[in-house]
Image: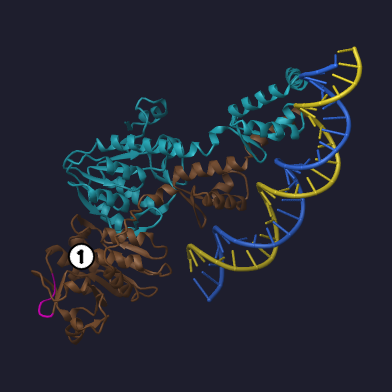
Chain colours: A cyan, B brown, C blue, D yellow
Amino acid sequence: MQFFAIFFVYLMQLTASLMLKRERQAYIVHQVNLHNKVLSATLSAEIDVSEDTIRRDLSELSEEGKLIKVHGGALSLAFSDITYPSKKIYSQDNKKIIAQKAAALIKDGMFVLTGGGTTIVEMARSLSPALTATFITGSVPAIVEYMHHPNIEVIVIGDKLSKSSKITLGADAINRIKSIKPDLCFLGINAIDIKHGITDNDWDVVQLKQAMINSSQKTVCLTISEKLNSFQPIEVCKLKDIDILITELAPDNPLLQPYAEAGIQVI
Amino acid sequence: MQFFAIFFVYLMQLTASLMLKRERQAYIVHQVNLHNKVLSATLSAEIDVSEDTIRRDLSELSEEGKLIKVHGGALSLAFSDITYPSKKIYSQDNKKIIAQKAAALIKDGMFVLTGGGTTIVEMARSLSPALTATFITGSVPAIVEYMHHPNIEVIVIGDKLSKSSKITLGADAINRIKSIKPDLCFLGINAIDIKHGITDNDWDVVQLKQAMINSSQKTVCLTISEKLNSFQPIEVCKLKDIDILITELAPDNPLLQPYAEAGIQVI
DNA sequence: AAAAATATTGCAAAAAACTGCAAAAAATAG
DNA sequence: CTATTTTTTGCAGTTTTTTGCAATATTTTT
């Protein structure tokens, strides 16, 4: 405890004694880049100056484009609006990578069951025009994509259309899925995690996904790596129930090792 | 010693609970993009703020176009973006006229069965946004239109998708149609004529149309006047089996008189 | 049609930002 | 080294922003 006391006093002296404006601002920029955010109150306490001074510093640094000033403090440029669109495109690219890996699994003559979601639609777009296979789905955007393909057959799963997810949901859809035995099932997933398995946030969607997994010979899950190690309220299935996991990452990425060790083929 | 305890607690609070507004909003956007939907209640618990604050955040983000605010939470844009073909086939004003006459027949709470074809799609576009009804169809373009309507429910008839006609066709579709009793059935027709009744040129489509007509309380046929008094190889049904005929012409047009005399209500 | 959940609105308290100003510190010139 | 100018800083009063609460609508569900 004494050590802490000494340490603390040392810190105080360091910060309090000599801090020129330049020095102080450099410190602030450093903190922002380190923690992605700073609070005026914290800085004011850390360096021993009034909040007014901190505010003036933040204003200047903001003018210089070194950080983003917000009510109560400042954020790193990483939060900038500029980052958002590019991040979105980035995510779109990732989905393309996933889509291509997934499309490569489909061979001529296969029966393929697919769910909904943007990743699945992307996969539909990535299919080779020469592919001849049968796709079964209740996802309207996917149907539209498949419809434009020259050689694949499309079986529509009917039922009540969910406007939010744009797929058909209900007992009818589930029954129909139970009556088929596709070779492959592609599922865009919302959350996956070693402990909870695959999870989602919509009861009806979960019912359908469970039926899809049960009917299929092999289940392939598609997800961007951001969704790895996250979970949601409702369990879809255990990890052992899926066969293949596809992300935009290289299969040997450390993030994926736990899943590989759980017996899932990671692509 | 006590001072340190207080100091640490202070720090923890700063980092754990206090979240700058912008930061919080960035987190919300991230969550929405990741999981396609968020609930106000969940967010309020996750970040430790009142639901009012979350709602205000969602409103602002919604204004900025970063997500779609809905009752209880918000949805990702990506999901709603997927389908907006918006290819305005300002084909014929005639079809618009027909569409409007047809749309006027549909009252709140009705169950409506519709076929495929451009006229039906045009009708879907002419529906009042306030209309609350249930539409049943196997036509993909129609489904896409209905999906964009705020208040109608959509039941999709599943089966094998015919790429030429963009509707589902087959025994399954027919069976499903047999199991329902819609108030109205709208049929875009290919040929009508006093002697042969309603005729078409695709065997499977005819099977389906027959099932639709048999199931429905009332059958409404839509056609541009060009198709009047023409016929095709396969009979769909007799004139007496349909109830209402809609064309772009005024009801008292001489061309339509034979049909009126045959007992059909001409609009 | 009633009950539950969610939204909206107005309001008040707290936090933060801004304003003008004066004192202190630093820089500059003589 | 001193006097003057400039910059920086803190302070007090005022304004704006943010947030939560309560009362009231509205929507969704049963």
Residue under the point 53% across and 33% down: A78
Vertical comparison of A170 with A84: above or below? below
Q: Amino acid at mark 1?
A: Ile
Residue bearing the label numbered 1: B174
Residue B139 sits inside the magenta stretch: no
Q: Is B94 displayed left or right of B53 in the figure?
A: left
Element class at badge 1: helix
Identify which residue is drawn at 32% across, 48% down. A115
Tell which subunit mark 1 falls on. B
Depth order, front residue of B169/B3: B169
- Chain part drawn in magenta: B194-199
The location of residue A193, given as percent across then percent down, is 43, 36
Residue neighbourhood size for the residue with mark 1, other residues' Cα within 10 Å, grouped as few (<14), some (14–19), many (≥20): many
A181 or C24: which is nearer to us?
A: C24
Task: State the residue in front, C13 or A245.
Answer: C13
> What residue sits 36% from the left and 49% below the top?
B82
| Quarter of the image where the C terminus of chain B is located | bottom left
